Image (cartoon, coloured by chain):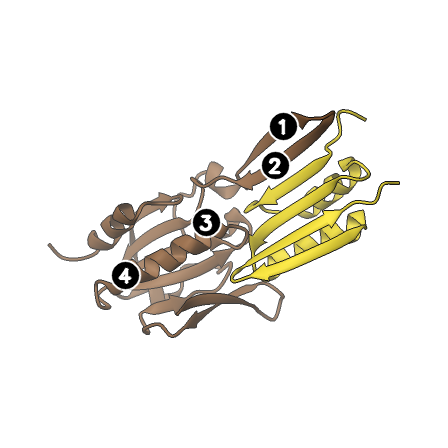
Amino acid sequence: MGFTFASNDAGRSRIVIVNEPDYIVPLRIAPSCLEDCLKQGKWLVASMSVWSVHDIRAGHRAIELVKRQGGLVKLGLRPFDYPNENSTWVPRLGAEQRADQVEILVAEEDGGREVTIQGRSDASPVWVSISEGQVVGVRYGNLADGDIEELILQLLPV
Amino acid sequence: MSCVPFGSSFGSSPIRPATVTEIARVIKPGGDIRLVGPNTPEVLTAHQQVANAVGGRVYQTVLGDYVYTNIIVPAR
């Protein structure tokens, strides 16, 4: 259940959905524009860094949350390598969101130095809610379940 | 030599080609490098590139969706 990663023809990530409903949809890495399939219906798209354990865990959580709506909202799962790859399909992506965002921690110990470099948890996934091809919401980072549900519910009629 | 890293850890952060070069340049002989990331093609390639650049002993474990690579740099 969920998804795994495989390699495409160019050696880049390709998402493989495993035993999930057909409204859980793998999307290609680095598209040139918003795909036609996203221009119909209601979608939550989670764009996940291929470098981030946090992002992938968030993608698995999103599957469970979208399934609660029984297919009224589709979930698109997209991998990205360079954040700039999202600028072709997410409107008004800011300069900060187009660059790698990391935290660097340095600790001195016993005459040596340890450097830890980790991805920032508030930079991705990139969450995009889309209704009939119109982007209605964009959020960034490791959202709580309630925040993800909010993105889903804003796509549904009240 | 006190200003160079003795050890380095990378977790969930991109490892770009320039990063690989910089790791190889600053890592102290006898230091260790710990790399953690998802089991994706880009991550596996980057871990291998770091191992090739610094040499030494490489220990790699895949647990579920994640790959852990430890590299012990030779004490020259």
Seen as rendered, the residue at the extreme front is A110
What is the CA distance from the residue labelled 4 to the residue labelled 2?
Answer: 35 Å
Q: Secondary structure under badge 1?
A: strand
Chain of the residue under the numbered disc 3 shown in the image: A
**Mark 2 or mark 1, which is nearer the start of the sequence?**
1
Q: Are marks 4 and 2 in contact (CB under 8 Å)?
A: no
Nearest-to-viewer mark from 3 and 4: 3
Q: Is residue A57 left or right of residue B51?
A: left
What is the CA distance from the residue labelled 1 to the residue labelled 2?
Answer: 8 Å
Nearest-to-viewer mark from 1 and 2: 1
Q: Which chain is brown?
A: A
**Mark 1 or mark 3, which is nearer the start of the sequence?**
3
Mark 2 sits on what residue?
A116
**Mark 2 or mark 4, which is nearer the start of the sequence?**
4
Mark 4 sits on what residue?
A66
Rendering coords of residue B75 (x, y %)? 85, 41
What is the CA distance from the residue labelled 3 to the residue labelled 1?
Answer: 24 Å
**Mark 4 or mark 1, which is nearer the start of the sequence?**
4
Residue at 53% from the left image edge and 55% from the top image edge: A50
Give, as a three-letter code, the residue at label 2: Thr
Mark 1 sits on what residue?
A107
Q: Secondary structure under badge 2?
A: strand
What is the CA distance from the residue labelled 3 to the residue labelled 4?
Answer: 18 Å
Nearest-to-viewer mark from 4 and 2: 2
Give, as a three-letter code, the residue at label 3: His
Q: Are marks 1 and 2 in contact (CB under 8 Å)?
A: yes
Residue B21 to residue B49: above or below: above
Q: Which chain is yellow?
A: B
Quarter occupied by residue B38: bottom right
**Mark 4 or mark 3, which is nearer the start of the sequence?**
3
What is the CA distance from the residue labelled 1 to the residue labelled 4?
Answer: 41 Å
Q: Quadrant of the C terminus of chain A?
A: bottom left
